[in-house]
């Protein structure tokens, strides 16, 4: 289409020039002017069409970039959600208050009900004012708990009481790996450090010499790169 319009523009201008040169009649000159004007209008429309095409292409590229960003964000948050679901799956729940016992529950609903019941206990005495202890009431997911590990028979080198026959240790289990969450938090930390460096740059330039400023900024950038490398 563009080549056709260019051809019409060129042909129109050529025809107008030929008519002006070869025909002396006024009406022919008017025709020549009309053709020239039409060719000029075609040329203007071609420029506009090209500009619109460029804008359209830029819009398409912007949409593609936005779509890629949305997909990337969706992938990251899907990974975070999967890790969060994995942490909760198969785990028990608890409720607690400083004036109530620590209680284990099989479901979140049971833990919430116990916490709300504890609040109700304080509510019954609220006519004399709420107790500050009410703010200690909470419930949550038990992610890890102390678990017996390495149980074995007592050895002569073990420093334990004589009546102890077996020894062991305790660790928080299960071991938890959350690569998506760790990467997400690391990225937030890197952005915070970059923002801090940018925010103090003008202060450094105002207080220090140009050499000292660049040296300090470079040291901070190197530190940021090293931190990024360690977290990959």
Image: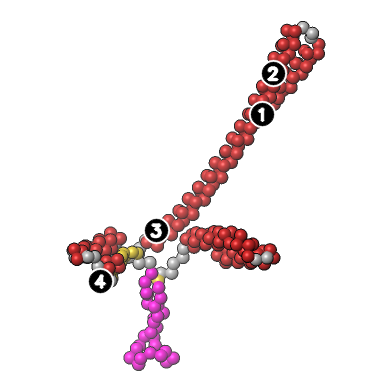
Q: Earlier in the sequence, mark 2 or mark 1?
A: 2
Identify residue for label 3: 85
Q: Earlier in the sequence, mark 3 or mark 4?
A: 3
Q: Earlier in the sequence, mark 4 or mark 2?
A: 2
How far is the residue under mark 3 from the one under mark 4?
31 Å
Q: Which mark is residue 100?
A: none
Q: Nearer the viewer, mark 4 or mark 2?
A: 2
Q: Which mark is residue 47?
A: 1
Q: Which mark is residue 37?
A: 2
Circle 4 Cα neighbour tier, 10 Å, few/some/many (<14 / 14–19 / ≥20): few
Circle 1 Cα neighbour tier, 10 Å, few/some/many (<14 / 14–19 / ≥20): few
Furthest-right residue in this view: 22
Residue 35 drawn at (x, y percent): 71, 15
In the rendered structure, the answer to whether residue 176 lies left or right of residue 119 reads right
Residue 162 drawn at (x, y percent): 35, 92
Residue span colored magenta: 144-172
Residue 225 drawn at (x, y percent): 61, 63
Report which quarter residue 18 is drawn in. top right
């Amino acid at each position: 289409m563009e080549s056709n319009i260019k051809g019409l523009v060129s042909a129109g201008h050529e025809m107008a020039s030929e008519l002006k040169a070869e025909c002396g009649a006024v009406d022919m000159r008017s025709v020549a002017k009309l053709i020239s004007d039409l060719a000029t209008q075609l040329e203007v429309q071609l420029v506009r069409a090209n500009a619109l095409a460029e804008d359209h292409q830029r819009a398409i590229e912007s949409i593609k970039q936005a779509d890629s960003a949305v997909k990337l964000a969706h992938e990251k948050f899907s990974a975070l959600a999967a890790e969060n679901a994995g942490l909760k799956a198969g785990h028990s729940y608890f409720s607690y208050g400083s004036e109530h016992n620590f209680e284990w529950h099989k479901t979140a609903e049971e833990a919430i009900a116990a916490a709300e019941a504890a609040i109700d206990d304080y509510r019954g005495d609220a006519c004399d004012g709420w107790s500050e202890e009410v703010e200690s009431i909470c419930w949550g997911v038990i992610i890890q708990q102390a678990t017996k590990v390495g149980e074995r028979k007592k050895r002569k080198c073990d420093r334990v009481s004589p009546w102890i026959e077996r020894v062991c240790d305790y660790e928080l289990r299960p071991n938890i790996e959350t690569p998506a969450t760790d990467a997400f938090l690391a990225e937030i930390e890197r952005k915070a450090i970059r923002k801090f460096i940018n925010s103090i740059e003008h202060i450094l330039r105002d207080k220090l010499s140009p050499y000292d400023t660049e040296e300090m900024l470079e040291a901070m950038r190197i530190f940021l790169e090293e931190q990024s490398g360690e977290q990959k």
